[in-house]
Amino acid sequence: MNTRVFTSPLFLGFDHLEQMLERATKTSSDGYPPYNIEQTGPTGLRISLAVAGFTMDDLQITQEDNQLVIRGRQTDDLAGRVFLHRGIAARQFQRAFVMAEGIEVRGAWLDNGLLHIDLAKPMPEPKVRTIEITKPNLGGDRAPSRLHGLTTED
């Protein structure tokens, strides 16, 4: 089902948001590894992934444009080991999160089988601007030219 969200003429310049939504729906949905996202403060977020059995050398975190990508690949050191039951997942994975503009990765650490990634989102400043409505300049004098409510001096 290909439903375009931002096709309304009321949404101007939101093409990049539609691309982000498409990218987010294409990410892996198998649920591995499980993760939490928590708010740690007014501007702080933390992603925690359960990566039991992975070491720091097995994990890679990259920021690709507005996507945070976490990859895990364990090295095979199973020589001489015989498993009677193997229930701990040891497969490679890639988990991607689409981030809004301005979100900054503050740091990452591995603790007790959990990979934590701290993020900070910017505090939006309210932006209100009044646009002046002007009459067209019908005279031939050298008065300031006005175009779409913006003033420029010659």
Image (cartoon, grey):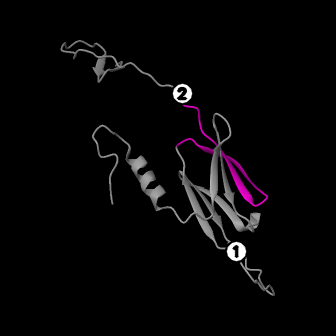
Q: Residue 38 shows which numbered tag? A: none
- The foreground one among 137 and 64 is 64
The residue indicated by pointer 2 is: 125
Residue 36 lies, in percent from the top left, at: 64, 52
Q: Would you identify the image quadrant in which residue 10 lies?
A: top left
Q: Residue 87 shows which numbered tag? A: 1
Residue 87 lies, in percent from the top left, at: 70, 74
* Nearest-to-viewer mark from 1 and 2: 1
Mark 2 nearby-residue class (10 Å; few <14, some 14–19, many ≥20): few
Amino acid at dot 1: Gly
Q: Secondary structure at mark 1?
A: loop
The quarter in which the N terminus is drawn is bottom left
Residue 33 lies, in percent from the top left, at: 63, 63
Q: Marks 1/2: CA distance? A: 49 Å
Amino acid at dot 2: Glu
Q: Which residue appears at 23% of the width and 12% of the height?
A: 141
Which residues lie in the magenta part?
Answer: 101-124
- Residue 117 falls within the magenta-colored stretch: yes
Q: Is residue 12 above or below residue 5?
A: above
- The foreground one among 104 and 2 is 2
Q: Earlier in the sequence, mark 1 or mark 2?
A: 1
- Residue 151 falls within the magenta-colored stretch: no
- The foreground one among 47 and 125 is 47
Q: Majority secondary structure of the magenta segment?
A: strand
Tell me: 105 left or right of 109: left
Q: Which residue appears at 44% of the width and 22% of the height?
A: 128
